[in-house]
């Protein structure tokens, strides 16, 4: 990926490296308002893919690896060691996990912080909404209590849960298979 426009490069760098969930929602809203006909749907924007594509461009330009988290950790590790060479390995790992996140953190999501039954209910709500099967009353209550509930739920789900949801919504499994795999994934007895 060759970026000619410096403003675009700065915007992408912000979106991919520093933007919060609220920032990403603002970007989505701005793109919706723009009504760019070249976009099928802002909801279909894949920021992870954008990050990978951008990193591939940087990889070619600067010789860095293709894993964003790994590359970021390596760069920050080198900067820390340059400034504080006497830092212990444990202190370094603690700083890296706090500033960048652990390598497994994005894969696990925030599911570990919630009871499995709660995550199960959230996934079912998310899927029902995605399929247009959620009752108006339930949708009203969710939006009233948490206006951006779909983005927040998605942020909580692990990569495995997201993949399972995607496979179900893409028709790669039926509802019964989906529910059984979800229960298994969350460690809930069927």
Image (spheres, grey):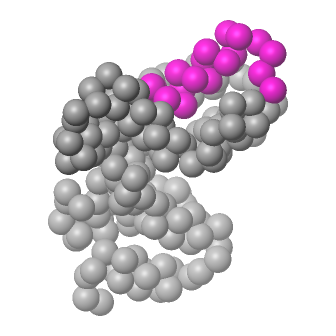
Query: Above or below — where is 165 with respect to 155?
Result: below
- Image quadrant where residue 96 sits: top left
Residue at the far bottom in the pictured view:
190
- 134 or 48: nearer the eye? 48
Give the residue drawn at x 54%, y 31%: 16
Q: How many marks?
A: 0
Q: Which residue is drawn at 59% across and 70% down?
A: 167
Residue 68, given in percent of the width and then of the height, sits at: 54, 43
The magenta region covers: 2-19
Instruction: Please say whether residue 74 is visible from this viewpoint.
Output: yes
Q: Is residue 179 left or right of residue 92?
A: right
Residue 136: percent from the left, percent from the top?
A: 39, 50
Q: Main secondary structure of the magenta part?
A: helix
| Residue 82 to residue 139: above or below | above
Is residue 134 visible in the rendered structure shown here? no
Q: In which quarter of the image is the N terminus?
A: top right
Residue 97 placement (x, y as % from top left): 29, 43
Instruction: Name the spot of residue 149 as percent of width and height, x first.
Output: 35, 43
Q: Which residue is drawn at 56% across and 71% down?
A: 168
The quarter of the picture where the C terminus appears is bottom left
Residue 19 sits in which quadrant? top left
Does 83 lie within the magenta span? no
154 sits left or right of 59 in the view: left
Judge by depth and name the residue closer to the eye, 145 or 107.
107
> Does the magenta run of residues contain 8?
yes
Residue positioned 81% across, 16% down in the render? 4
């Amino acid at each position: 990926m060759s970026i000619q426009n410096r403003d675009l490069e700065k915007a992408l760098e912000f979106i991919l490296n520093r933007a919060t969930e609220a920032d990403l929602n603002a970007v989505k809203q701005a793109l919706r308002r723009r009504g760019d006909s070249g976009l099928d749907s802002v909801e279909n924007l894949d920021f992870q893919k954008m990050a990978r594509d951008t990193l591939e461009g940087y990889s070619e330009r600067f010789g860095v690896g293709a894993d964003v988290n790994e590359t970021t950790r390596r760069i920050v590790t080198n900067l820390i060691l340059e400034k504080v060479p006497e830092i212990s390995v444990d202190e370094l790992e603690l700083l890296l996990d706090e500033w960048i996140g652990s390598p497994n953190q994005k894969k696990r999501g925030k599911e570990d912080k919630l009871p499995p039954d709660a995550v199960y209910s959230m996934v079912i709500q998310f899927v029902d909404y995605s399929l247009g099967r959620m009752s108006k009353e339930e949708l009203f209550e969710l939006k009233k209590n948490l206006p951006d509930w779909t983005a927040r739920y998605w942020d909580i789900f692990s990569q495995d849960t997201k993949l399972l949801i995607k496979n179900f919504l893409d028709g790669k499994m039926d509802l019964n298979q989906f529910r059984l795999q979800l229960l298994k994934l969350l460690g809930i007895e069927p």
